[in-house]
Every structure is written in structure tokens, then in C-alpha cells.
Amino acid sequence: METLNFLLQGFDVALQPTNLLMALLGAFAGTVVGMLPGLGPINGVALLLPLAFALGLPPDTALILLAAVYLGCEYGGRISAILLNVPGCAASVMTTLDGNPLSRQGKAGIALSLSAMSSFVGSTIAITGVVLFAPLLAQWAVAFGPAEYFVLMVFAITCLGGMVGDKPVKTLMAALMGLGLATVGVDSPPASTASPSTASACPTASSSSSW
């Protein structure tokens, strides 16, 4: 019930005319930036972040603007994927498989409409799921320990090796090399050393993890 109260408060803020206008402008600007191949939503938000400071917006309006920019960039990447067969971001790669062939058949408008509708439906389902199951998932995530993370990584590598077709050995070797490189240095979220064996070789990492 507390989650629903917070959600209603959020809708009360988001549905204000100024915030709706900022969301519209942010979605438009994000779509334009997202159409440029290689930028992606993260770079789009970074490029348009100074705009929120320059306009002197309050914190809630600025966050709504940046969130709309992010979502606009996500959809903008699909436009270049469908029309040019060049995905604007990593999430748009799969759109090129079906969207660009439709564009070559003269059905680019249908492909863009289907992409927009599927994005809207998927986002709505995801937001609804987060609102309903976030407390349960949070408790489940906290219960994850080293053993569960190890099994999860083994499962991910196994799935990766099974999806590559006739060259599973090369894919598994590349995945293991990536895991080996990931054990060097500092793990970003907790600011601790990724592997105990690298702590002595990284004094900066050891000092930062002590904070």
C-alpha cells in the first residue's frame, strides 16, 4: 500500500503541465539524438544534461526531462536501425533483422509503428511489474550470496555458448577471457577489489575499498 501511495504522489507531480511539456521536449530531443548511430541513450543524456542546468529547472522537472530524453534515445535508435540498417544503440540491433527488410519492401511506416507500439507495451508491462513486485524482488536480491552469483554466471556462460551455433569453444574461451579481465582492478558499484589476488597489485584499489 505504501508503494501505491508513492506512485500516486509521483503521478501528481508528473501530470503537472510544466512537467508534461518537459517530457514532450525531452522525448523529441532524445529521439533526434538517438537516430545518430553510435550515440545511444547514455551519451544522449550526457549531451543534453547541461540543458537541464541551463534552464534552471527544479529537481523533479529535470529528472523527468532526462528520463524522457533517455526513452526518446531508445526509440530513436530503432529509426536508424529500420531505415538505414544501422542500429543507433545496442538495444536496436535486433530491430535490424525484421525492421530493415520491411523498409526495403516499402513498409517503413509499418515497421516504425510496430516498433513504437511494442516499446510502449513493453515499457508499460515493465513499469507495472516493478511497481507490483519490487518489494518482493528486493528481498530476494538481498538474499543472493556468492554461491548464487557463481551459479548465475555459470548459467549465463552456458547460455552464451549454446547460442553461437557451431563454434561454442571459441565463445566459451572469449567469455572466460572476459571474466579473467574483470577480476583486475576495482569493482565499480561497491568500490572494492574485484579479486583478492589483485589487491596487493592495486594499492589505489585497496585504499579506496577501505573507505
Image (cartoon, rainbow, N blue to C red):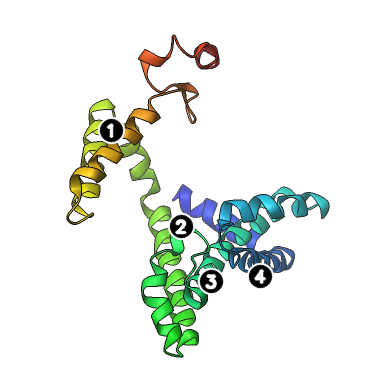
Vertical arrangement, residue 8 with respect to residue 170, above or below: below
- Which sits in the foreground, 164 or 45? 164
Disc 3/disc 2 C-alpha distance (Å): 12 Å
**Residue 18 x %, y %:** 74, 65
Residue type at mark 1: give it.
Tyr
Q: Is residue 19 above or below residue 180?
A: below
Q: Which residue is pictured at 51% across the width and 17% down the height? A: 205
Eye-nearest disc, 2 or 1:
2
- What's the CA distance linking mark 2 and mark 1? 25 Å
Q: Which of marks 2 and 4 is in front?
A: 2
- Which of the two labelled residues, at mark 2 and mark 4, occupies the earlier sequence position? 4
- Disc 4 target residue: 28
Q: Which residue is drawn at 60% across and 56% down?
A: 67
Query: Which residue matches tag 2?
Result: 90
Residue 80: mark: 3
User: Circle 1 sits on which residue?
Assistant: 149
Task: Identify the mark nearer the N-term, 3 or 4.
Answer: 4
Q: Residue furthest bottom?
A: 106
Asked if marks 2 and 1 touch (Cβ < 8 Å), the reply is no
Earlier in the chain: of badge 2 and badge 1, it is 2
Residue type pointed to by label 3: Ser
Relative side of 76 to 154, left or right: right
Q: What residue type is disc 4 on? A: Phe
Query: How far separated are the C-alphas under marks 1 and 4?
Result: 39 Å
Label 4 sits on a secondary structure element that is: helix
Residue in front for this viewpoint, 74 or 168:
168
Give the number of the disc on residue 77.
Answer: none
Mark 1 residue element: helix
Q: Nearer the viewer, mark 3 or mark 4?
A: 3
Look at 63% across and 56% down and name the residue there: 44
> With 96 as the anchor, is 52 left or right in this view?
right
